[in-house]
Amino acid sequence: MNPLAVPARELEPQSVISSEMAALDAGYRGAGVTETQPRLDYPPYRSSLARHPGRAAYDVDPETIERCAPCFGARDVEPLDADLTVGHPGAPIGERTVVTGRVLDGDGRPVRRQLVEIWQANAAGRYAHGRDQHPAPLDPNFTGAGRCLTDDDGWYRFQTIKPGPYPWRNHRNAWRPAHLHFSVFGTAFTQRLVTQLYFPGDPLFALDPIYQSIVDPRARDRLVAAYDHDVTSHEWATGYRWDIVLTGPGQTPLDAEAQDGDGA
Amino acid sequence: MTPIATPGQTVGPFFHLGLSYDRDSELVPPGSPAAIVLRGRVLDGDGLGVPDALVEIWQARPDGTIAGEPGSLRRDGWTFTGFGRASTGPDGTYAFTTVAPGPTEPGRAAFLAVAVFARGLLNRLFTRAYLPGDTAALAADPLLSALPEHARRTLVAEADGQGFVFDIRLRGPAETVFLRYPGQRP
C-alpha cells in the first residue's frame, strides 16, 4: 500500500474542497468586480488559513530604494544555468521541453538583463528536495533548478523536462497540476513576482485550490503557457511560450538618469 | 492597451531548490567591519514560527547610495550588492549579515525594503524594516506618521547588541503592516 494513503491526520475529501471552491466562484461571479491576482484569504487552500494577513495592504508610494531593483549579471548566471537537462552524467528521463517568453513591465516594455529563476519536480512528480516524501523516483540526472537573464528584448528561455503532477496533503487525494515555479525581478523592487507556470489542458486545474485561488478565469488562464510549434524543434524537444507581465511601470530610463545624476 | 499583470502564486514548500544559494543571506561576510545582524521570526496567525518562509531584503549602503552591482548570487566577499535572501529555520527565524543602510535622501528615515514569501501565502507581501535611532526622521516619515502607533510599531526594527530584530507577523493582533504600491490591483 502506498504510505501516503495512510494520513497522519484525517484529511477531508476532494468533494469538500470542491464545493468550497464552487461557492467562492459563485460569489465572485455575482460580485461584478474583476480580480487579477490570487486571494490571500482562500480557505480551500488550508495552509493559507493561518498565513494570510487579516488587514488589507496599506497603499503607499514607493521610495527611492523601492523604485530600483537588485542588479544581476554575467557574474551571477552562466548560460548553461538555463539548461536543466545538462550538468549530470546522463540525460534526465521525461519529455524534453523548451519554455520561452518575454518579461514585460506594466507598460508593455521589455525588462532587460534581469534575473529569472525556476524550480520544479521531475517527470515523475518528485522534487529533489529533502522534504518531498512522495514515493516517486528521484532522477539522478535531474535536479530541477535553473536561472537565466532576460535578453535585450526581455526574452528568457529554459530547456528542461516537463514536470509530473504530484500529491500533497491539503486534502485527501489532492494532486497539484504539473507546474514550473518562476521567480522574476523587474526594474523596481515593487515588481517582484513569484508565480507558477502551468501546461495547457491539465485535468487537475478544476480541483486545485492554489490555481483556483485566482478566482477570475481569465486571470488564472494567464498562468497557462501556450503550446508553440515554432518553439518545438525537429526530433528534439516540445516547446511552450509564456509571457510574464509585472505590476506597474518600471523604472524609466529618465528615472535612471536622474538617479545617476544624484550620484546614487 | 495596458497589459494586465501576471498573477502571483505561492512559493510552495520546495523553494530552497531554486532560490537558496551559498551565502544568500550574507550581504557582507560575517565579522566584517560595520557588519550587523538583521534577524527576526516570521510568525503565523497562531503565533507559531513559519519554518518554510523566505525573506528578501533590498537596501542602500550606509551612505544612502544604491548599489548597481551584480554579484548577489555569487558573493565575492567585497562587492556590496544590497540584496539578500534568507529562508527561515524550524522556529521561523531568519537572519541576515549586512550593514545598516543610510537614508537615500538627507533627513529621511532609513529602511530596508522587505519581501516575504511562504508556503500557504498565495502571493508575496511587501513591507519595510525601518531602523530605530533617528527619531526626527522617523516622526517625519510619510508612511509611519500616517499609521496608528500599534501599526507603526510593526515597521520599526528593535536594536539589540548585534544589530536589529524585525519580526514579521503574517496575521493576528500585532500583524505587520504590509504595503501595496501604485499599479498593484487585487
Image: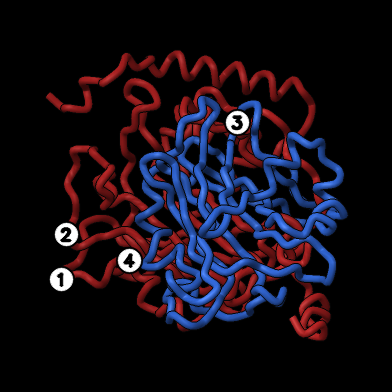
Chain colours: A red, B blue
Q: Which numbered circle lies on residue A140?
A: 2
Secondary-structure class at tag 2: loop
Say above or below: B184 vs A254.
above
Disc 3 marks which residue? Answer: B171
Q: Amino acid at mark 4?
A: Leu
Marked residue chain, label 1: A
x then y, percent, for residue B140: 87, 54
x then y, percent, for residue A109: 72, 69
Disc 4 marks which residue? Answer: A84
The answer to whether residue A199 is seen in the rendering is no
Which quadrant holds residue A212? top right
Say above or below: A103 vs B50.
below
Secondary-structure class at tag 3: loop
Q: Earlier in the sequence, mark 1 or mark 2?
A: 1
Callout 1: few (<14), some (14-19), or many (20+) C-alpha neighbours within 10 Å? few
- How many marks the image carries: the answer is 4
Marked residue chain, label 3: B
Q: Nearer the viewer, mark 1 or mark 3?
A: 3
Give the Cα separation between the discs numbered 3 and 2: 40 Å
Q: Amino acid at mark 3?
A: Arg
